Image (cartoon, rainbow, N blue to C red):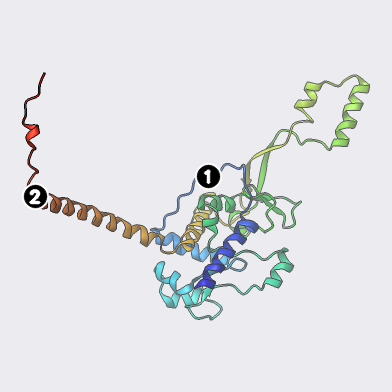
Amino acid sequence: MKSTFVGMVIITLICGVSLFGAETDWELEPMKPDLKDQDSLQRGLALYRDFCFGCHSLQYQRYEKTADDLGIPHDLMEEYVLVTGEPIGSYMSNSMSMEDAKKWFGAAPPDLTMVTRVRSPKWVYNFLQTFYIDESRPFGVNNKVFPNVAMPHALLPLQGVAIEECFGYQSLDVLLRDEVIEAAIREGTYEPEEYDQGFGRELNCPELKVIAGTGSMSEEEFEQATFDIVNFLHYMGDPSRQARMDLGKYVIGFLIVLLIFAYLLRREYWKDIPKPARSPAEHMPTEH
């Protein structure tokens, strides 16, 4: 038990540092998980298995517990999710070795059991939706929520190719900019205002655009798919959350009823307790 707790602490720190340690200026779209939506949780499990599980394990949760909580019969769980032939009581770890992962990616992909507790579900939801093409990166993609993330776009077949929609002008290299200024001064055509409005403006890329026909899903379908994945990960981070919240309502109701009975019992007890007699001094007239 102690080793499991220590392991969860370590993996939480790894997730926070290696995958989700970056802050972002990107405006995050709202996302509110719904742990009562069992269909969404089941779809999230299926999508995670197909697109994420090859690299990112969920090694602090068991297949059997997941199947029971999500209403999946054990035989279906074994047939469609437990493809490696492991016992259904096993932890949800993948077959990727740490050595191979370091060779392929430079660092081992972190376990994601606790990722929505390290970062909010809203953060992870927006992270999955904001990959875009960037040929300067090793995997050819970048991310608006986590700039320069060192991973490929796993959901690219679903979303399609996303590109930045930019406005303004790209600022020039410093040396080239100086040459342009010097040439303009020699020719007597240099105007600071024109320079500031042209060459000196930073490139602003506030939006992403998905090229039509490059993905298997529409925009609405992809938003639902990412919601399902994050909803599933939110469940994985605390499998007993919904049961605890449901039980809490009954506990609060019980305490309210108990308070009513306690008050009535107190009032009944105090009926038989005589009030203290008033002292003689209280009956004496007051002198004016």
**Looking at the image, is 142 positioned above or below residue 282?**
below
Instruction: State the image quarter where residue 20 is shown.
Output: bottom right
Relative to residue 173, is residue 205 drawn left or right?
left
- Quarter the C terminus occupies: top left
Q: Nearer the viewer, residue 16 or 24?
A: 16
**Looking at the image, is 54 positioned above or below residue 25?**
below
Furthest residue toward right: 186
Place of residue 109 in the rendered image (x, y in percent of width and height, measured from the top left): 64, 64
Place of residue 55 in the rendered image (x, y in percent of width and height, measured from the top left): 62, 67
Disc 1 residue type?
Answer: Glu
Place of residue 263 in the rendered image (x, y in percent of width and height, measured from the top left): 17, 50
Disc 2 crowd rating (10 Å Cα; few below 14, some 14-19, many 20+) is: few
Which residue is the site of mark 2? 273
Disc 1 crowd rating (10 Å Cα; few below 14, some 14-19, many 20+) is: few
Which residue is the site of mark 1? 29
Place of residue 206 in the rendered image (x, y in percent of width and height, measured from the top left): 63, 39
